[in-house]
Amino acid sequence: MAQPKMSNTKDIEMLSPVEEELDFFFSSFFGSSYPSMYRKELTWKPSTDFYETEKDFVLVMELAQIKPEEVSITFQDGILTVRGIRKGVPPSERRRYHKMEINYGPFEQKLVISCEVDMDKLSAYYKNGFLEIRLPKRIKHQTNTIEIKL
Amino acid sequence: MNGQQQNIMIQPGDFSEHPQIPPELPVLPMTNILIFPYVVAPLILSDETRIAVINEALSDRKMVALFAVKSKDGGSHPDNLYKIGTAVFILKMFRLPDGNMGLMVQGLSRIRLESVVQTEPFIKAKITLIHEDESRSIKIEALVREVTEIFQQIVSLSPLLPEELGQAIGTVDNPGRLADLIVSNLRIDVAERQTVLETLDSENRLIKLLTYLNRELELLKLGNKIQSEVKSKLEESQREYFLREQLKAIQKELGEKDDRTTEMEELKKAIEGAGMPPEAKEQADKELDRLSKMPPQAAEYTVSRTYLDWLVTLPWSKGTDDQIDVVHAKEILDEDHYDLKDVKDRILEFLAVRKLKESSKGPILCFVGPPGVGKTSLGRSIARSMNRKFVRYSLGGMRDEAEIRGHRRTYIGSLPGRILQGIRKAGSNNPVFMLDEIDKVGTDFRGDPASALLEVLDPEQNTAFSDHYLEVTFDLSKVLFITTANVLDTIPRPLLDRMEVLRLPGYIEEEKLQISKQYLIRRQMEENGLKKGQIRFTDKAVRKIIAEYTREAGVRNLEREIGACCRKVARMIAEGKGTGLTVEPKNVATFLGPRKFFSELAQRKAEVGVATGLAWTPVGGEILFVEATAMSGGKGQMQTTGQLGEVMKESAQAALSFIRSHAVEYGISDDFFQREDIHIHIPEGATPKDGPSAGVTLATALVSLFTGRPVKHDIAMTGEITLRGKVLPVGGIKEKVLAAKRAGINQVILPKLNEKDLEEIPEDIRKTMSFTFVEWLDEVFDLALKKNGRKTRLVKRKA
């Protein structure tokens, strides 16, 4: 059996690399000279895995405490956009933070996918705080093979 | 929903949420930092009040109002805050290990501080949002392009800004926000940032930004230029170092050695071969060790190197073999010098002793005599006769002790003294070392060279002569030191004590004639390119030159006059006016001009009050005339003129006293000394004279004056007198007699005790002259004064 056909890495591009760079800087060089970054909206980026199998591209996002109806997934012009919101609970008592790194509010993750995908067969589900999105690759049929459905 | 799969509707939707900025916010005053809207940046807080502000904000909406303080000294008082700032959202917070608070914040909107609600424990203020003018125009568009381009350049030049930032600004579509983002990333001070923050319309904000950008770009370009220059220099020197190391490695591989190693090895070999005594060898080894550890660039290096050079080049054990053949040596001495029998004998004796006992300590010879008698050339002849090297060094006018003993090595440009320099020049440790003009060594604050010479010239001490520069001792005992002097008086006693004095008196006419015939004429002919037969001197002509054109003890001027004749003949031959010539008495004047000297005697007649004395000078003997005269109307006082020294004045006093005390015997009236003043003058007035030997002459002149008996003009005299009228012996008899002979005086009165000195005078001279030896002054007067005279004059006066 042939190796599963994988995409070239250049076919897939994560958007906003600056912001990820920023997190890297933030963790390692905090306090030293550090560039100020621009963010259009007050959005955050959930931790994301993105991989492919023989048939599908798979996007997994760590998104606890969201409501499925508050997530939107669109695929347009080769860009897969996942948006949503995690609503923070307004504090009911006075707090004193010692660490604060959980993001609340609107989030957004964008991916550029230049391979052909079958948007119609896109599926998504949310389980145990993970959002998983599957995009089946569009397979080009050989002319001399006919798939017979039984 | 936990653990349960939930399907997600795949649908578009907008969940973006614009945070509501409340009208009251805790105020975070910042000294150096401004956050612009839509800009994410880190903040670090250490101040307790500020941390309290953040804690308050995190308990609420995670928002603070950030205002910059105007002046650092003013603290966080509300009056010290700019009125326009930014509402800031806190994205993340954590504590740093040092207790400071780290924040990641995002600017939300420009705000205006309206009124302060509370100041304790932190400031809380009422604020209003500022709505920015977001209109666009072509001009703004142009500014955006310009600003973007310059910022791209800055990003590419600055090491602090990541390349991605350049791309990121491309995605900012709002001109005002572009300006905000770029300002956030520029290194400009807070006041300038604040002006950008306070500029609300995009166009002006971009224009302001452009100035800062241009300045930053220039700064960066300059910085990069400086850095690249420094770097290229650094690289160059590193490259050179690297290549040198490689070269060394290659040389090592090839079995070659680098210059340094070769140099050290050569020096080592030289030290081994120098034949140094153990003490010096040890010093040299130590110095070589030091040198090999020194970098060649060190200032000490050359000093050390020069020192080692000196150590190895000194002839520690290298000497010439003496070839002492007394007979041969005599031939050489005779060949080079006429007569000087005593001196030659002494030299030959010294050579003979040296031959029999090789280790005998050499005497230090000192040749004393007038200039031009051949002292220096005699030294040369001695070296030649012993087959030794000859070194000559003139001490005349030397005042610095360091000239003899050298400077210590700590001084820049220090060298060993002249003694060791001479030894090195000779290249042997037993040269004939001539120290000329030892009587003219000076002394001043720099030390006394004569004292330093004591060590050099003492055979007991100079086996271990220590030079300041060398630091180790050098054996001078094999050196034959010869010194020369014109007079002995100025030589310090201890120094004179160490030397064996050999006098070279002046020459008399006969000797000069012989010297001329045997040496001078030949030498001058050679020097002027004349061949044998082209010039001849008759004896009479030479005598005429000696008598009428020179007056000296030596033969230097005589040689010069002979040289003048030779030159003139050479010119004549060169001009083709003749092929040769004989110099005769009658044509001497055509060569040398009119005669320069006259015999004093020729001008003199027997006179009253004038006596002829004899004097000794460093340049030979002289005759001198003592003139005395009396002036009536005085009180018997005596004055003396003619630069007479103390001793001479005193002997004039003594003479006068003697005469006064014996006035009756000489027929001088008693009251003569009450009536008359006496004046004694000795020409030439400008020449200082001193010494006791004119006593006889002074007394004779005075008696002649008082008695009116003239002094015979063809008699010369010398001798010291006592108050009892005794005549004491004096020195320099030979010179004085020769001077008398030169002056044409054939009769000389000498002290009886000097009779023995007559032997010094060549016999042929002695034969032509008559000498009378006297013991008492009376004998002198009898001999020198004429009997008749004008005695009557005084008698008449008396009457």
Image: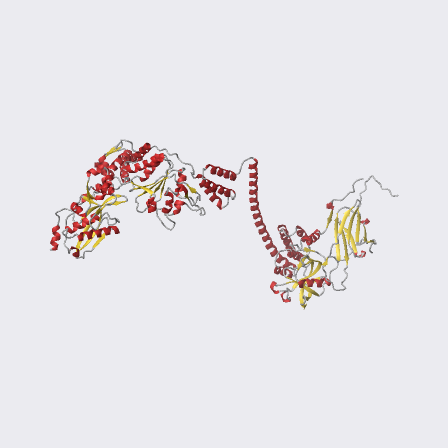
Q: Position of residue B183 (x, y in %)?
A: 64, 57
Q: Position of residue A52 (x, y in %)?
A: 78, 46
In-image side of B256 versus B412 (left or right): right
Quarter of the figure with the N terminus of chain B: bottom right
Question: Of B606 and B477, which appears nearest the observer?
Answer: B477
Q: Which residue is at the front of the view, B356 or B614? A: B356
Image quarter of residue A100: bottom right
Count up the numbered dots.
Answer: 0
Q: Nearer the viewer, residue B545 or B638?
A: B638
Q: Quadrant of the C terminus of chain B?
A: bottom left
Evaluate whether residue B558 shows in this view.
yes
Q: Nearer the viewer, residue B74 or B531?
A: B531
- Colour style of the rendered protein structure: secondary structure
Determine the residue positioned at 13% across, 51% down. B667
- Measured as percent of width and height from the top left, residue A117 is found at 79, 47
Q: Position of residue A72 (x, y in %)?
A: 78, 55
Q: Quadrant of residue B519?
A: top left
Left or right: residue B626 versus residue A5 is left
Q: Is residue B61 visible?
A: no
